[in-house]
Image (cartoon, rainbow, N blue to C red):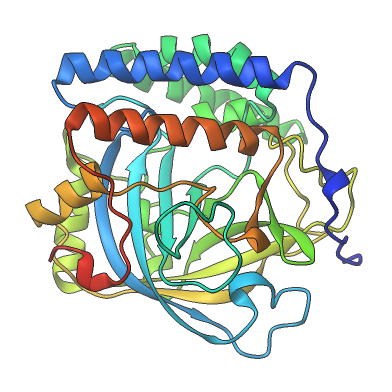
């Protein structure tokens, strides 16, 4: 492993015409969100609209971390309360029969540090992750180009979407046999219908990690890791039903890992489609996430997670500032989505200060 690079403002390079493209993307997403709200008579998030569970847990920062990893909210050993939202990636509500990318969003409560936006309520750190390590549209320019393709696939009937995923998995295997890693687009389309608790979730984009630059991920451990690769079967709400049954008697454990950038060219911050080679920089555990048995099926908790809460990568501290054009457009997109969702539903946004704020 090489030496971790130092964070500096010049690591980010604004893309040509980025401001105009970003505004067009946000306007397009807001239009789609409003259309979905009209059809459902209720507004959802413009991405990761379908939630499967809102979980309460603890995040314990490890002792004795090397200085390069002991940064930001991980600078000192200790335990934070945390909320975890499990979801599916599309901006509309689909059947769980369709294999889609899944998401895990963490809201770490009451963290120290200078805020990215001091005007926002609360002192929490949000970390948003997906069960694919890279993003097919790794720059804001490519994202705009792919919006139409993504929406066209999302609008297909469930049977057609399952067919697309099956074909993509076949192509992926052929590519791998040829000795080349599958591209980010293939990885996304080839998402398999596995148990969400057994998945590893990735930030995809880069974050500042105090004095350094990193990507973060959450990987299952112990008995939870035994769920990795286990296929699910069921109907429209199969994932939620599986999680309700699981957490009625069992918990789940994960390690939160940090991968530090050691090479500005091989591990860029401006292209989230580039995988960071673990041989150049390993995934180092810095904290343990523990989720105890709990009532996932509580209607009050589901409404709280769906309608009151927001998860935003820009809700956090300066030491973990999101980096790259995809992360910069998310600053606009998440604010727009949250504001429109709460306005259309006539429900105020709530930023919890402790787990006591969360319905049981």
Residue 167 image point, x, y percent? 49, 20
Image quarter of the N terminus: bottom right
| Left or right of residue 350: residue 259 | right
Q: Residue at x 62, y 39 (%)?
A: 327
Image quarter of the C terminus: bottom left
**Quarter assignment of residue 84:** bottom left
Name the residue nearer the viewer: 80 or 243: 80
Name the residue nearer the viewer: 113 or 359: 113
Regarding residue 190, the answer to whether it shows in the image is no
How many marks can you see?
0
**Quarter assignment of residue 32:** top left
Name the residue nearer the viewer: 149 or 334: 334
Vertical relation: 198 (above or below) 48 = below
| Left or right of residue 83: residue 210 | right
Vertical relation: 148 (above or below) 357 = above
Name the residue nearer the viewer: 248 or 168: 248
């Amino acid at each position: 492993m090489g030496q971790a690079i130092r964070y500096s403002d010049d690591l980010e390079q604004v893309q040509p015409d980025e401001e105009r493209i970003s505004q067009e993307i946000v306007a397009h997403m807001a239009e789609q969100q409003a259309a979905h709200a009209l059809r459902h008579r209720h507004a959802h998030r413009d991405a990761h609209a379908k939630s499967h569970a809102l979980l309460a847990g603890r995040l314990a920062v490890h002792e004795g971390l090397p200085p390069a990893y002991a940064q930001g909210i991980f600078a000192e050993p200790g335990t934070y309360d945390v909320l975890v939202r499990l979801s599916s990636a599309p901006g509309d509500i689909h059947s769980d029969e369709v294999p889609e990318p899944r998401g895990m969003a963490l809201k770490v409560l009451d963290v120290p540090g200078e805020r990215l936006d001091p005007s926002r309520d609360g002192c929490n750190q949000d970390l948003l992750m997906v069960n694919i390590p890279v993003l097919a549209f790794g720059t804001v320019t490519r994202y705009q180009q792919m919006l139409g393709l993504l929406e066209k696939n999302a609008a297909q009937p469930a049977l057609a979407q399952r067919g697309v995923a099956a074909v993509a998995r076949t192509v992926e295997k052929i590519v791998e046999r040829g000795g080349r890693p599958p591209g980010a687009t293939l990885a996304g389309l080839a998402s398999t219908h596995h148990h969400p608790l057994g998945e590893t979730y990735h930030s995809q984009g880069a974050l500042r990690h105090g004095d350094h630059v990193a990507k973060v991920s959450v990987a299952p451990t112990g008995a939870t890791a035994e769920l990795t690769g286990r296929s699910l079967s069921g109907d429209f709400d199969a994932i939620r039903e599986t999680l309700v049954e699981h957490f009625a008697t069992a918990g789940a454990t994960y390690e939160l890992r940090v991968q530090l950038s050691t090479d500005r060219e091989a591990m860029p911050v401006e292209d989230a489609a580039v995988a960071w080679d673990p041989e150049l920089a390993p995934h180092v555990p810095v904290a343990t996430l523990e989720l105890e048995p709990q009532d996932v099926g509580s209607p009050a908790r589901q409404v709280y997670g769906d309608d009151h809460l927001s998860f935003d990568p820009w809700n956090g501290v300066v030491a973990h500032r999101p980096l790259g054009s995809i992360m910069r457009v998310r600053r606009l997109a998440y604010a727009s989505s949250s504001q429109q969702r709460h306005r259309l539903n006539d429900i105020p946004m709530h930023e919890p200060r402790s787990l006591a704020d969360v319905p049981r």
